[in-house]
Amino acid sequence: MKITYTARKVNLRDNFKELCEKKLSKYQKIFSEEAVASVVVTMYKNRQTVEVTVNDKGMIFRVEDTKDEMNDALDCVVDNLGRQLRKNKTKLERRLRENISKIDQLLPDEDIAEEEEFDIRTKAVPVKPISVEEAILQMNMLSHDFFVFINAETDEINVVYKRKKGNYGLIEPER
């Protein structure tokens, strides 16, 4: 697994990187060698946010936590990543057939319910080309957290969404 680090408004020390590699190494057996882990550490109002995103064969696992110290946030992030992996164990087993025994060794069952059935409601909506600003206005008028639209500038399907911090995000397809 390749690990990349990004620091925003904070300097990362080598001992933090070593600790991060040590903690994430226990999950390397589950992911393929092509897996990429991105660690982003951000300082915001004297609080440290650690975000870990692991991308492996199209599967993306993302965990984020904020604490006073980045090492504490890293501990919580690694624990939450383990919980996510346990929760999605059956999906992972199907995806990574050759690693089933490794998953069982690393992630023993801990009162995780069987794979749940998803109750999916389908809704068809007319989609017309509009600007990003119009899409945000429409999303806010509907009191939704996201809005799917065709971008008038690119003629691509895009999604605008409201982020936790109150600002907005835009998802565009990558070719």
Image: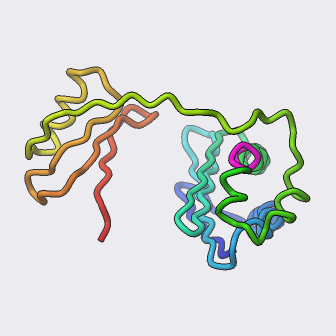
Q: Is residue 70 visible?
A: no
Residues drawn in magenta = 84-89
Query: Which residue occupies 28% across, 56% down?
Result: 172
Q: Quadrant of residue 66?
A: top right
- The colouring scheme, among rainbow, by chain, secondary structure or one colour, is rainbow
Quarter of the image that includes the C terminus: bottom left
Would residue 87 be counted in the magenta stretch? yes
Q: In the shown orientation, is residue 144 left or right of residue 93?
A: left
User: What secondary structure predominates along the stretch shown in magenta?
Assistant: helix
Depth check, front residue: 2 or 101: 101
Depth check, front residue: 48 or 40: 40
Would residue 42 be counted in the magenta stretch? no
Quarter of the image that includes the N terminus: bottom right
Q: How many marks?
A: 0
Q: Position of residue 150 (x, y in %)?
A: 15, 48
Q: Position of residue 14 (x, y in %)?
A: 75, 70
Q: In the shown orientation, is residue 166 left or right of residue 140?
A: right
Q: Position of residue 55 (x, y in %)?
A: 57, 64
Query: Which residue occupies 24% across, 21% down?
Result: 142
